[in-house]
Image (cartoon, helix red, strand yellow):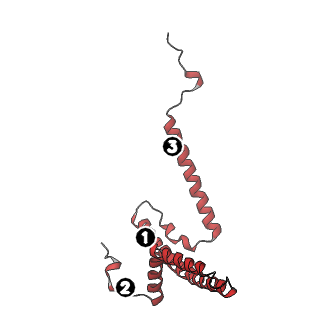
Amino acid sequence: MPSNPKSSSSAKKGSWFTHFAKATAHASGRPAAFIGAFMIILIWAVTGPMFHYSDTWQLIINTGTTVVTFLMVFLIQNTQNRDSQAIHVKLDELIRAIDTAKNTMLDLDDLSDEELDKLRENYVALAKKAEREKHDRSRGPRKSAGSSSPPTQ
């Protein structure tokens, strides 16, 4: 049985950005982050009359939200890329470990869009065929019109 990669010391290594992205993604998904953001907006709204709803007052929130949004795009993309890679590795291991699985599925990332579409069409057709077979089995055997017996009295 292979060792757990999380238990190795090399799993703890990573770029500063990866560590920062993980921590930020974890923190930003918490209720406290939402409450903090809501409080900032509330404070900004309440101070509107103090600043006579000036252009500077509006510029503060516009600039702040734009900068945060811009930076979060990169952090979210980094997190999504990492999650996607982890899922691919896990799926590759499952495909490799199951004897009846097609090992050709391991390299799907390298296929063109057209090749992926064709492969997907094949699996959609297989799914439809399986659904028809399931439906036919659930209906049970059918009697033909000429073999029906007369009703008994």
20 vs 57, nearest the viewer: 57
- Which amino acid type is shown beneath numbered disc 3? Lys
How far from the left and from the top, in percent, is residue 93?
Answer: 41, 69
Give the left or right position of residue 73, taking residue 20 as reference.
right
Q: Are marks 2 and 1 in contact (CB under 8 Å)?
A: no
The percent coordinates of residue 80 (x first, y second) are 51, 75
The residue labelled by disc 1 is 90
Q: Tag 2: residue type?
A: Lys
| Left or right of residue 70: residue 28 | left
Query: Separation of disc 3 and disc 2 at Cα?
Result: 48 Å
C-alpha distance separating marks 2 and 1: 19 Å
Q: Is residue 82 left or right of residue 46?
A: left
- Residue 75, disc: none
Q: Is residue 52 visible in this depiction of the protein?
A: yes
Residue at the far bottom in the pictured view: 16
- Which residue, given by chain and number where applicable, does mark 3 sit on? 134
Residue at the spot 53% in from the left edge and 75% down from the top edge: 38
Q: What element carries label 1?
A: helix
**Figure quadrant of the N terminus:** bottom left
For residue 90, above or below residue 151:
below
Q: Which of marks 2 and 1 is in front?
A: 2
Q: What residue type is labelled 1?
A: Lys
Residue 143 at x, y percent in the picture: 54, 27
Residue indicated by mark 2: 12
Spatial distance from mark 3 to mark 1, Cα to Cα?
30 Å
